[in-house]
Amino acid sequence: MVSKPPVGDPVQDAPQVAAPQHAAAGLPAVAHTLRIAQAQMGVRRTARTLLKVNQKDGFDCPGCAWPEGDKRHVAEFCENGAKAVAEEATLRRVTPEFFATHPVADLATRSGYWLGQQGRITQPVYLPEGADRYEPVSWEQAFSIIAEELTALSSPDEALFYTSGRTSNEAAFLLQLFAREFGTNNLPDCSNMCHESSGSALTETIGIGKGSVSLEDLHRADLIIVAGQNPGTNHPRMLSALEKAKAAGARIISVNPLPEAGLERFKNPQTAQGMFRGAALTDLFLQIRIGGDQALFRLLNKLVLETEGAVDEAFVREHTHGYEEFTAAARAADWDETLAATGLSRPEIERALEMVLASERTIVCWAMGLTQHKHSVPTIREVVNFLLLRGNIGRPGAGVCPVRGHSNVQGDRTMGIFERPAPAFLDALDKEFGIVSPRHHGFDVVRSIQALRDGEAKVFFAMGGNFVGATPDTEVTEAAMRNARLTVHVSTKLNRSHAVTGTRALILPTLGRTDKDVQKSGRQVVTVEDSMGLVHASRGNLPPASPHLLSEPAIVARMARAVLGGGSATPWEEFEADYARIRDRIARVVPGFEDFNARLAADPGGFALPHAPRDERRFPTKTGKANFTAAPVEYPRVPEGRLLLQTLRSHDQYNTTIYGLDDRYRGITGGRRVVLVHPDDAAALGFADGAYADLVSEWTDGSERRAPGFRVVHYPTARGCAAAYYPETNVLVPLESTADVSNTPASKSVIVRLEQSESA
Ligand SMILES: Nc1nc2c(c(=O)[nH]1)N[C@H]1C(S)=C(S)[C@@H](COP(=O)(O)OP(=O)(O)OC[C@H]3O[C@@H](n4cnc5c(=O)[nH]c(N)nc54)[C@H](O)[C@@H]3O)O[C@H]1N2
Ligand SMILES: Nc1nc2c(c(=O)[nH]1)N[C@H]1C(S)=C(S)[C@@H](COP(=O)(O)OP(=O)(O)OC[C@H]3O[C@@H](n4cnc5c(=O)[nH]c(N)nc54)[C@H](O)[C@@H]3O)O[C@H]1N2
Ligand SMILES: [Mo]
């Protein structure tokens, strides 16, 4: 299988390479932000918009899910948040004339970058069966097309309702309610590709699939371990928290196959001193091999166990379960095997141990570097073992910190966007609305693709996101999507998913975070939940990108009325008119949201959801305790002459949205088809810096997948490892290559070989 490099790029993909940088943010970031923002929005709109980001009376940044903290700066956003805002608040527009001159076949030849650069979509459009281009359609017609296809299904389980993580709590609650009233739990979401492994591991071990720390905890920690995360690019405001923690005496270990600039040194653009000098953040850099983390934490656990007085015995006795089995497994950990799995040296691990033992309050932060491997769930369970051993959960300054991606991905899950909902949640939903939700599980992302491929699913509806762009095995996924009877995308901007359609297709343009949302009862606010379980309001302040847009809650409400008709007793019209009425219902269905509207009115800055392990050291697991686990240690075995490829983000992208062609901190400019390889590995494989290679992935069933024409960059990554950007490399990830238990695509462990490229 071959993924063709996109043609039609306004900028030729011709990457230039300079030395990687050692510090993140600072003046270059400010200049870069303003350049991108002003190109999209102009000068006045830029100022007006950026000053509202993350303010209590403003909108939640559509960038990442990092929390804001109580004392807000005038400029409470980061370089990449500003790019996310500019991308949405752009003055560029995609009009019906655009679709008239660009047939779907033309859109399919365009790069994601080009599609995104066309601007905000302004009207609903429809691709009839057999037509070659989208045409304008009224909202009413659009909903009746959806109703026609959904009611023609032989089972509600032939429909899929995908959610990307920008959707507000209100819209998410309505969407899952609609899906369940319609009769299915097929609610796959981006989380299935993201932190599902964290959710799976945490729910089993501590009883709740969310992080247990607040910003305050980070500021108070003695030791913060940042594993498998690149905050300088993906959560830049986290660097301020790390800086503050360091100033208060914390130490930081970063565990990563790449030396990431933001973790090395941070130049805080919010302080004059920080802007120029910056703070060194990392005390110890463990340059681990991809997939070596479970082995590392297992050995650290063994070493802690062997240290007199290092285990918090009172905590273990009172609050945990499974200690005996775990200790037996941990004591068997082996130095040689760990050194092989991690590529680390003995002194490095001993140094880490000293720092671990010196810390009374330890936090482990992680993101995709831990969640997207075959053995991600046992890896994260081992992190939990590590924290439990020294009583580091439910103590100020300590805990688990899975750093979420999309700005409301955590909230969407809290609202019930989940293909495997808890029975208690469904009971509450049914009682509130007088419905009977299906109890059998629905399809997650990978299962949804298989269902489309195998003809088990026929209608695909997406609340945001870029499903075919973000999912693995591009060719397989695109073919599967083309099998659908109807594909519907509620979107702000164009992307690849609009060019890969079912027999019929709809694009439904919607308001974004920055747009003012006015309904019958007046101006609306929506709410979101950040990575630390704080719920707060978000209120857009810009005139909507077009007068023809509907908000996400309005789209779901109208779709529900069209599909369910008189059979539904749910007051969909009332919900559309006044989102406070949706919140009244959330308050009665979702624990932690009691008196939702009143609390929101009292403090638009938000409130914290309850978290039993954090708040009261209570662990709502099956055993009623925090569970130690004792899985066998796994790590990827890479055959001779092959590399282990991780697919990751550049500095100029937001998932499949490409802001620009640079990756400033890594020294790459003007192109994205690059593969970072250790100079010694590259030399051994016969690839000079600047040579061009095809990446060929090899899967256990003997199949191969190819992504051609990548410029080889000699780069200081861990030995045996390689890195290249997503989504260009998604074609290499086999659909069946997923994490055990969580079924998350293993996007960070792809075995590849490099072949001399013919397409250079
Ligand atoms: N600007 C911007 N912000 C974003 C996003 C964006 O695309 N752009 N995306 C958002 C989303 S949805 C998410 S989920 C987050 C993603 O945030 P990250 O997880 O930081 O994103 P990635 O670029 O996938 O980076 C993975 C990191 O893990 C490291 N890594 C890879 N494999 C391993 C391993 O086996 N072990 C260890 N220890 N490290 C490893 C990589 O070198 C890299 O530093 O960011 C969110 N924020
Ligand atoms: N190989 C590889 N694959 C990966 C990953 C990886 O690291 N490697 N990471 C995975 C991860 S962590 C994630 S979260 C997924 C991301 O998967 P998705 O969330 O599906 O993808 P995005 O690129 O974030 O979606 C961008 C689109 O969302 C739409 N959009 C933006 N804002 C709004 C809004 O307010 N409302 C609506 N309705 N639409 C909006 C726009 O049309 C835009 O084109 O990708 C996953 N895929
Ligand atoms: Mo994500």
Image: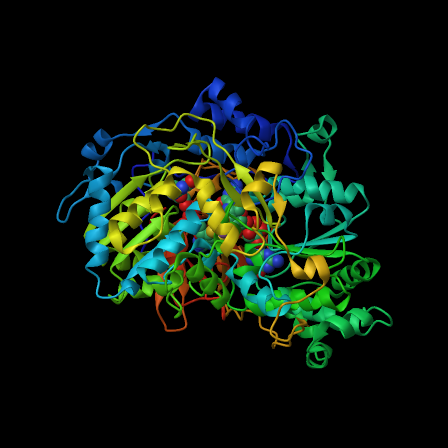
For residue 136, which quarter of the picture?
top left
Asked if 427 appears above or below 6 in the picture, the reply is below
- Which quadrant is home to the N terminus? bottom left
Q: Residue furthest toward the right? A: 308
* Residue 196 % position (x, y): 51, 61
Q: Nearer the viewer, residue 105 or 480?
A: 480
Counting the numbered discs, the total is 0
Up-down: is 117 above or below 476? Answer: above
Front-lying residue, 202 or 701: 202
Q: Position of residue 418 (x, y in %)?
A: 44, 60
* Snapshot colouring: rainbow
**Frontmost residue, 662 versus 173:** 173
Q: Residue at x 68, y 72 (%)?
A: 625
Say which residue appears at 57% left-offset and 34% top-offset: 54
Residue 493 falls in image quadrant = top left
Query: For the view shown, which residue lies furthest in the top direction?
Result: 44
Residue 678 lies left or right of residue 391; in this view the side is left
Residue 652 shows in the view: yes
At x 31%, y 47%, the residue is 497
Q: Where residue 129 sits in the image (x, y, percent)?
A: 14, 49
Residue 420, given in percent of the width and then of the height, sits at 44, 65
User: Is residue 750 at least partly visible in the picture?
Assistant: no
